[in-house]
Image: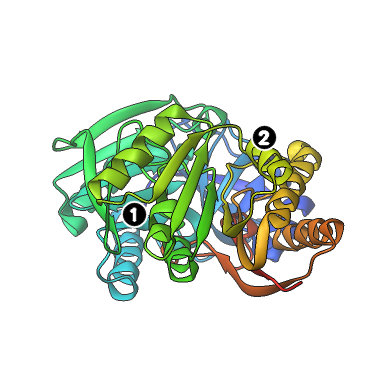
Amino acid sequence: MEGYPQVEARLNRHGMNRWRSGHPWVYRAGIEVVEESTGREAVARVLDPRGRPLGQALFSRESQITLRFLTRREPPVDREFLRSRIERAIGFRERALTGRDAVRLVFGESDGLPGLIVDRYGSHLVVQFLAWGMDALGPEVTEILKDTASPVSILARNDPSVRTLEGLPRTVTPLHGETPETVVYHEGDLSMTADLRRGQKTGAFLDQLDNHRLAGSLARGRVLDAFTYAGGFALAAAGGADEVTAVDSSADALGLARAHAGRNGIDNVRFVEANVFDFLKDADRRGETYDMVILDPPAFAKNKRELPGALRGYKEINLRAMKILRPGGILISCSCSYHLSEALMEDVLTSAAADTHRSFRVLDRRRQAADHPILLGFPESLYLKCQVLELVD
């Protein structure tokens, strides 16, 4: 079968270095020439400086990320190519993540489908087309999802700001069926709700599900969940804790967390609307202590320029959290900033511990859930870091 219409893109020395590294992205500066095209081609045939084929990539004229590799081979990129990739991604989740009614079915480059996100909430799918080339293939992807996943509805949450960099509009668009305002899903025994049209990401944060369960297994005594948002960590910890204090600066987020607590008959969680930095500082000044502190802040560094300030912020909250832990207490510290690497996060925690004159042992180093797999050679796919520390002295 003939593939989708393609344009040819020839790499220069910089692009070749990128290709040899195994990274799936090539920036505009790495491309020597792109042949004339109609402007509608979603796929590029990628060539080396001598014109030898290197593979095929999604193409974008607007974005600095001009090429996103689909394959380093020469099969036709057509409907069957997309179907095979989607079926493989869904099949992995069905084999490895049984019993979950909310799961990420497709995670972009990690599933060989750059710029495509597909999340399942029960019988409903939420998709995001985050690259120009993938957006152009959106109608084909939608039809394949209807055939392979048999959803009641498909909603396109094409509202992330990254679409602006691709020259794409930010919209929320129904693609198939009727998507309800909210959908119920489960985290173990907990019943949660996702707002598929207006909630964070595609409706809920699915990447912390495994870490929520870990917190629940370790929780005891007094627990503090900072940046609680919808209450995932707080409600998981409530089963083993005497009491949980859940803090967030957003009244809307706390309203959602309270609703989740009520939905599950949980009455040992206290919800506090406050700036977390101020709350931690005040707790330290008052001499309050906790058996577990959970830190799951939003991304402090959304780009490399913000990293120095982010490092100060991460150190501040971790230092304050370490100071209010009781002997033997547990700190669960998370970061969803890609630019804060695992090594940098370890440095921040080590520096904070040294400043408190306290010693911690590492119980676990964790990442995002398994339905958000990490692609070798693509560090951007490793964005969520989670360290579990126990106060020794």
Pick the quarter of the image with the N terminus: bottom left
**Label 2 neighbour load within 10 Å: few <14, some 14-19, many 20+:** few
Q: Which residue is mark 1?
A: 78
Q: Position of residue 134 (x, y in %)?
A: 42, 43
Q: Position of residue 140 (x, y in %)?
A: 28, 45
Instruction: Tell me the amino acid under the disc marked 2.
Output: Asp
Above or below: residue 144 compared with residue 174: below
Q: Nearer the viewer, residue 294 or 143?
A: 294
**Label 1 neighbour load within 10 Å: few <14, some 14-19, many 20+:** some
Residue at 75% in and 59% down: 349
Q: Secondary structure at mark 2?
A: helix
Q: Which residue is mark 2?
A: 278
How many marks the image carries: the answer is 2
Residue 212: image quadrant is: bottom left
Q: Nearer the viewer, residue 265 or 298?
A: 265
Residue at 71% in and 52% down: 318
Q: Nearer the viewer, residue 177 or 121?
A: 121
Q: Secondary structure at mark 1?
A: loop
Residue at 68% in and 52% down: 321
Give the left or right position of residue 177, taking residue 25 as reference: left
Residue 350: image quadrant is: bottom right
Above or below: residue 249 compared with residue 290: above
Pick whichever of labels 1 and 2 is earlier in the sequence.
1
| Residue 70 visible at all | no
Instruction: Tell me the amino acid under the disc marked 1.
Output: Asp
